[in-house]
Image (cartoon, coloured by chain):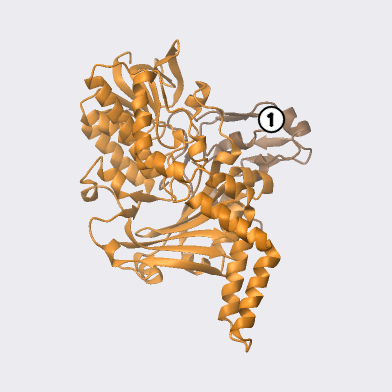
Chain colours: A brown, B orange
Amino acid sequence: MSINVEEKLFQNRYKVDHGRPHINIANPEVCAHECKTQQCTNVCPANCYKSEGNGRVVLITDGCLECGTCRIICDDYRNVDWEYPRGGYGILFKFG
Amino acid sequence: MSEKFDVIVVGAGPSGNSAAYTLAKAGLNVIQIERGEYAGSKNVQGAILYSDALEKIIPEFRDEAPLERHIIEQRMWVLDDESFIGTHYRSDAFNKVPYNRYTIIRAQFDKWYSEKVREAGALVICETTVTDLLMDGDRVVGIETDRENGSLYADVVILADGVNSLLAKKAGFHPEIKPGDVALAVKEILFMPQELIEQRFNIKGEEGVVIEMAGKITQGMMGTGFLYTNKESITVGVGCMLSDFKETQVPPYQLLEQMKNHPSIKPLLEGGEMKEYTAHLIPEGGYKAVPQVYGNGWMIVGDSGMFVNAVHREGSNLAMTTGRMAAETIIELKAAGKELVASNLAVYRQKLDESFVMKDLKKYKDMPGIFHTNPQFFTAYPELVNQAAHTMLTVDGVDKKTKEKEIFKSFTAKRSLLGLMGDAFKLWRAFR
């Protein structure tokens, strides 16, 4: 079963802080060459991490639900720089 | 903003609001910082509100708070791929005021609670992220925010900043959370007409039903699913340990979608219009994962302190209670003219130890470990008990004695006699 999470995220409200992502991959080379499992690309509930064909991982935080999964799950390499968005930005839950 | 406050509260969820409200009510000078547009806009929960914890803080909450339905029936389902076996407990005793628990919608509830905090006299600042704790030696003296000239000072800082407590981690108060200590839950809210919900769940007025689920829906991972009835919506979700997600690499939204399509669940959701998809971490490490929760000029409350009873699906009540107890500790120390340093704030931990919060966490202290190392509780057993029910309830000319033997054989084939006894012993140890 292949699920398009983008359709789910489309229902959510966001105030995107353009040009200032609150999460960054510390060293992209680690994802590309050292991390064999790349669990962030499957386990991020908003599918913000995508595996490119060449082994690199691309992160786009626009749909982020700010759960913290990617930070904690990257415990082998600690390669995720994770901060909260600036006040007022990011996901705005209507119901929560 | 260089005024000094008695207390700074970071975060406006159930624990932060309970702390800020209790402190402000007692006349202390409180400022509360919330990063969301309004209190609740960053918060996610199933959500069940347990009356007792809130009643101890705001006795008249039922007259004002936005509540969805009071729960009169709890269903517990153990699911195989195409069936479930379960127990339902429904009682008219739960239908008499004062109601014991309610479903709530957190964005609305937290907004209301935050209004109460303001009314009590606290200064609530939203759209502001706290970036650091300000230290004087080993003592917390204030916070740094992302506002211009955003430093604030206080005698004590209460960290109610949720499961991702970056502040406590940065300050070295506790190490980074381990994937085995948190569950990742994903959830959807589906809207449908009130009458439809009432027909489907055999309820009327403001009565509500909750379903807690375990079994094959978590695809071998340690976790549970849930379905709660609100007034005009249903929330449906599933959560599993992050360490299990890491291992299986099952996308959480796929897990949720498969659960929603289970033949026993699907009919309950039919016609619902999905209006929001959320994800949240739940600290489920239990007693052994609770960090140091106080120090010189700081205290930790709620999810940030891992105060969740995963076995009973309780969290918001522990959050409210720890928030209240932290506040009461400060109020007492202030009244006695004592410094808010570790040696005096230790009273907070004593209060927690004497309350249901730590007593319950202690009771189930071995639970996370046992379920981690024994996945059969989430796979083999749900399958076996469902098959057993199916065998016994299928009328096919085979005599009952033979059927019993067949069932017994299916259990020993999967787990062996010794395995069965061992499992029973492990469960007894974990639950006693």
Residue closest to the eye, B7 or B337: B337
Residue A93 quadrant: top left
Which quadrant, please, contains the N terminus of chain B? top left
Q: What amino acid type is highlighted by mark number 1?
A: Tyr
Locate residue B228 relative to residue A4 in the image: left or right.
Answer: left
Residue closest to the eye, B124 or B61: B61
Secondary structure under tag 1 reads: loop
With respect to residue B73, does B356 lie above or below?
above
Mark 1 Cα within 10 Å, few/some/many (few <14, many 20+)?
Answer: few
Residue closest to the eye, B338 or B172: B338
Q: Position of residue B223 (x, y in %)?
A: 55, 52
With respect to residue B239, does A74 lie above or below?
above
> Please, which chain is the residue tagged with disc 1 on?
A
Residue B305 quadrant: top left
Q: Residue placed at 34% from the left, 41% from the top? A: B110
Residue under label 1: A77
Locate residue B256 relative to residue B45 in the image: left or right.
Answer: right
Locate residue B139 relative to residue B351 in the image: left or right.
Answer: right
Residue B319 visible? The answer is yes
Q: Position of residue A60 (x, y in %)?
A: 61, 36
